[in-house]
Every structure is written in structure tokens, then in C-alpha cells.
């Protein structure tokens, strides 16, 4: 293995995060979840150590920054001194509204509701996050196909769509990335010109 760099460690951070998700979704024992979370934390420690060697920041700086951000962005949970509020919001929707308001106040110059959604997210996750942000910003959502039934049936339907794409020689991931790009540019329903 070559020299450790932030870039060389990215694939391991992503892999460990997916392992945590799999552990949770498959209902593995708590001891396994604990171990997987430790693996993610190790990746954070390694990145912080590399940064410390460059003189950029330390693990303690990361932890302090996280604590300050949690207090700043969750005034419905924390008082400015970091102690807990006496009461909390009643619903997730109310928490999201308060969170969005704080983020808008922090960065009033940020007008794009999609800013900050990672380009590297898989297309399906990026589509879901983009639509969540659009709905919260009051933007028009693309027409949806009615889905009746369970998430299991939805999964079967999505798998069938991917199978149809594959059988037709198309890349479902690329197609959805393109659709999300067009939606975010306000060009929903228009096709991007084929790359030359």
C-alpha cells in the first residue's frame, strides 16, 4: 500500500459507512454495530491524524467543531452554553424547519436549495435528497408515479426498472443522474444532448 493520503483513504471511509448501513438494515446484533461504528471512527481518526501532520487541524479540533455546530444548529435542543433545553419540538418536521432556518441564517448568501448535496452520492440517494430539499424550499416537484404497497414492493419495482434498462443496453444510474441534473436546472422532461 502506498502513502496514506486523504484521497487514498476515501474508498475505505465509504466502504465502512456502507457496512454500518448494512449492519443496521439487516438487524445485526448491537455488538456488530458497535464494531462497525468503531471502523468508521477509525477512518475519522486517520484523516484527522493526516491533517495534524500537515499542521491543519487535530482530532480535538474536529470534535470541538462538531460540538459547536450541534449547539449552533439545534437551538431547539441546546441552549447557547450547550446545556439541554427544557422542552423539545414535537415532530421531525418541526425540527427540520428549525434546522433549515438556522442554516439559512448562517449562510444567507446561499440561494440554491440543492447546494451541499454531494455529487458523489449514488443517483437514487441524490434524487431523494434533491426532492426532499426541493419540497422544503417549496419548489415544483416532478410528476410522480403512484406507488401503492410496501417498500419491499417498491424495491421489486426499482429492480425491474433497472433490469429493463440493462436489457435495453442503458445505464440506470447514469440515466437517473442525468434526470436529477436536468430537474435541478429546471429542465425536467428535456433530454440533455448526447455527449460528443
Image (cartoon, helix red, strand yellow):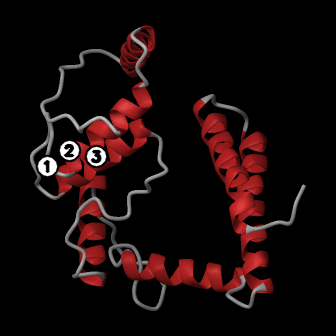
Q: Nearer the viewer, residue 16 or 164?
A: 164
Disc 2 to disc 3, how far (Cα)? Answer: 5 Å
- Which of the 4 quarters of the picture holds residue 118? bottom left
Element type at marker 1? loop
**Which residue is painted at 27% across and 37% down in the image?**
179
> Disc 2 and disc 1: Cα gap in Å?
5 Å
Query: At x 40% / y 82%, what residue is drawn?
Result: 72
Marks 3 and 1 close (CB-CB < 8 Å): no
Asked if marks 2 and 3 touch (Cβ < 8 Å), the reply is yes
- Tell me, for residue 183, which label it has, or none: 2
Q: Which residue is mark 3?
A: 181
Closer to the camera in the image, 103 or 83: 103
Q: Is residue 190 left or right of residue 148?
A: left
Disc 1 crowd rating (10 Å Cα; few below 14, some 14-19, many 20+) is: few
**In screen coordinates, is 185 left or right of 45?**
left
Residues at marks 2 and 1 touching, judged by CB atoms closer than 8 Å:
yes
Q: Quadrant of the rendered structure where residue 109 is?
A: bottom left
Badge 2 crowding class, 10 Å Cα cut-off, few under 14, some 14 to 19, many 20 or more, is some
Q: Which residue is mark 1?
A: 186
Which residue is outermost to the front? 196
Q: Residue at x 79, y 77 (%)?
A: 49
Q: Where is residue 149 shown, x and y percent of the image?
A: 29, 15
User: Which quadrant would the N terminus be assigned to in this image?
Assistant: bottom right
In the rendered structure, the answer to whether residue 135 lies left or right of residue 81 reads left
Q: How many marks?
A: 3
Amino acid at each position: 500500500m502506498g502513502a496514506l493520503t486523504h484521497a487514498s483513504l476515501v474508498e475505505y471511509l465509504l466502504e465502512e459507512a456502507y457496512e454500518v448501513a448494512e449492519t443496521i438494515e439487516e438487524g445485526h446484533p448491537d455488538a456488530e454495530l458497535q464494531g462497525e461504528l468503531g471502523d468508521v471512527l477509525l477512518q475519522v481518526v486517520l484523516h484527522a491524524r493526516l491533517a495534524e501532520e500537515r499542521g491543519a487541524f487535530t482530532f480535538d479540533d474536529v470534535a470541538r467543531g462538531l460540538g459547536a455546530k450541534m449547539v449552533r444548529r439545534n437551538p431547539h435542543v441546546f441552549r447557547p452554553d450547550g446545556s439541554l433545553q427544557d422542552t423539545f419540538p414535537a415532530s421531525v418536521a418541526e425540527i427540520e424547519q428549525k434546522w433549515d432556518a438556522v442554516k439559512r441564517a448562517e449562510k444567507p448568501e446561499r440561494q440554491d436549495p440543492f447546494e451541499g448535496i454531494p455529487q458523489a452520492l449514488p443517483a437514487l440517494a441524490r434524487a431523494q435528497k434533491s426532492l426532499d430539499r426541493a419540497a422544503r424550499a417549496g419548489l415544483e416537484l416532478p410528476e410522480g408515479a403512484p406507488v401503492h404497497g410496501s417498500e419491499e414492493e417498491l424495491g421489486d419495482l426499482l429492480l425491474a426498472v433497472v433490469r429493463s434498462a440493462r436489457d435495453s443496453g442503458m445505464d440506470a444510474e447514469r440515466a437517473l443522474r442525468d434526470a436529477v441534473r436536468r430537474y435541478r436546472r429546471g429542465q425536467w422532461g428535456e433530454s440533455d444532448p448526447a455527449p460528443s
